[in-house]
Image (cartoon, grey):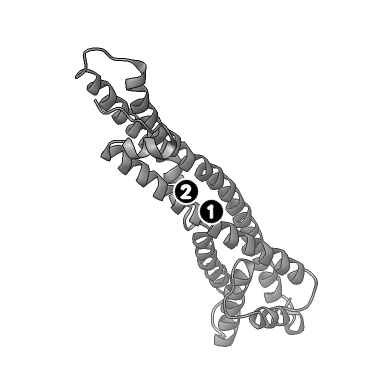
Amino acid sequence: MNVATDLSLWGLIAEASMLVKLVMLGLLLASVASWVVILKKRRVIGATHTEVEWFEDRFWSGGNLNDIYREVMERGDTHIGLEALFRAGFEELRRQRADGRGRSDEILTSVQRAMRVSLARQVERLENGLALLATVGSTSPYIGLFGTVWGIMNAFIALGNVKQATLSMVAPGIAEALIATAMGLFAAIPAVIAYNFFTNRVDGLESRFQTFMEEFAGIVERGMHATPAQSDK
């Protein structure tokens, strides 16, 4: 039985079996990947939340829909959050009015459909990467446990080749195996916390999106029954 003489963390990792090393490497890569997603989601969701706050303040501060649409377009070609929903709904409304076809309920249905498509894209953008966090958070402890079980199994099998076993002989093998469990938890805990946090934020944003869609549909419906001078808002 090979007895590890270096009981430092790196020494124990170096003395681990090849399978345990592969498990540790996989967990390390999973941890790095999850942190990349965490930092990206933090930036994306934060930017979307900022946009939602700005757009809600602007939308309900007054002015007609044409003015709001002009301001939205002046902010750039890439729109996220409520800007994207408003743009999709308003452009569909203008297209239907320009065509001069369809009843009021058909126009409203077309506007709502365009906004639902935009909503699906926005939610997909916000949720992109969360599946990876869920996978890392749920599987990393078991992968680490597999590495630990394998390492401990090898340590006890090796004991059968010696006549007299001592704690100093088996302790390094068990210690290096337990590192795999620690790495599994190290990868899983941040991923689980981030997944729950971001899921809650995405659900909150989605609820605000849906509320705006209903409010915008109400404005459009009222505008269809108003005089032409009142129909913008």
Percent position of residue 105, x then y: 58, 70
Residue type for callout 1: Ile
The number of discs equals 2
Q: Nearer the viewer, residue 149 or 230?
A: 149
Q: Are marks 1 and 2 in contact (CB under 8 Å)?
A: yes
The vertical placement of 131 against 6, above or below, is below
Residue type for callout 2: Leu
Which residue lies at the image location 67% right of the left edge and 80% below the top edge?
Answer: 69
Instruction: List the residue tagged with mark 2.
Output: 133
In this orientation, does residue 190 appear?
Answer: yes
Spot the residue most to the left.
Answer: 161
Q: CA distance from mark 1 to mark 2?
A: 8 Å
The vertical placement of 232 against 156, above or below, is below
Which residue lies at the image location 66% right of the left edge and 61% below the top edge?
Answer: 49
Q: Quadrant of the N terminus?
A: top left
Spot the residue most to the front.
Answer: 5
> In the visual, does 149 lie left or right of 202?
left
Instruction: List the residue tagged with mark 1.
Output: 38
Q: Nearer the viewer, residue 7 or 43?
A: 7
Spot the residue most to the right.
Answer: 61
Image quadrant where residue 141 sits: top left
